[in-house]
Amino acid sequence: MVLKIFQAGEIALRQSARPLTRDEILSEPIQQLIVAIRDTMRDAPGVGLAAPQVGIPIQLAVIEDKQETIDRMPPGQAAEHERTAVPFHTIVNPVLTLENIASEPVELYEGCLSVAGFRAVVPRARKVRVECLNERAEPVVIHAQGWYARILQHEIDHLHGKLYIDRMYSRSFTTMENFSRYWKDVPPSEFRGGGRKGGTR
């Protein structure tokens, strides 16, 4: 089943989601919901989708970054973004800890299925630790870096009523069409502290 993905402006995207109990996680409705959110993410397509994005305010998200998607990236970009394949999995009631917080954040373009058609440069921690439950209500600890760490931070933000636009460099906000036309080769660091330097395009 493919669900409707809520877009920016919907109240559900700005509310804090509630944690789930073990019994709730194992219940048939939540197990069916996990499948539906997975199918919706794949249909979009995307690399993550949180329950609030389909209007359900619970602390649950799914993640998957397929190798076939990475293989379609421009040469060298996967390595630059530290992007490797991530198998499908579910995170429930996640607690995020940023690692190496003294290091500079990584600045990359990000999109969101709930801000369809746009991208912006978002600074994120390179490494994170996430304690959560999986779809079987088992405790899991995830250590992630690079693009996977970015996905986790993005999806966990959704569970706290945040969108990437709350963290972006506002001058970098662009439509996908204009990103491809003007900005895809501009270093994201040029937007730090007030926008692109130099002349206009």
Image: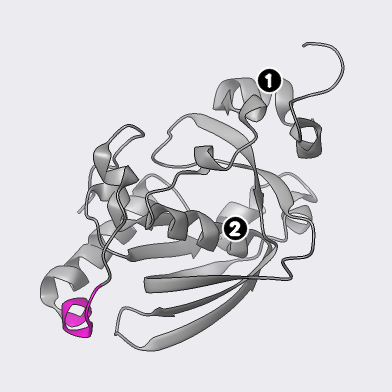
User: Which quadrant holds the N terminus?
Assistant: bottom left
Q: Circle 1 is placed at which residue position?
A: 181
Q: Residues within 10 Å of mark 2 (few under 14, many from 20)?
A: many
- Give the quarter of the image for residue 94: bottom left
Q: Type of residue at label 1?
A: Arg
Q: Type of residue at label 2?
A: Arg
Image position, residue 79 (x, y; %)? 77, 58
Which sits in the foreground, 44 or 111?
Answer: 111
Image position, residue 18 (x, y; %)? 26, 64
Which sits in the foreground, 75 or 108?
Answer: 108
On screen, residue 80 versus residue 141, left or right, reads right
Over which residues does the magenta segment extend? 20-26
Is 25 magenta? The answer is yes
Which sits in the foreground, 162 or 142?
Answer: 162
Q: Circle 2 is placed at which residue position?
A: 150
Principal secondary structure, stretch drawn in magenta:
helix
User: Which quadrant holds the C terminus?
Assistant: top right
Q: Is residue 97 above or below residue 194?
A: below
Residue, x 27% and y 36% (percent of image)? 10
Residue, x 64% and y 48% (percent of image)? 72
Is 43 magenta? The answer is no
Residue, x 50% and y 54% (percent of image)? 154
Q: Is residue 38 above or below residue 165?
A: below
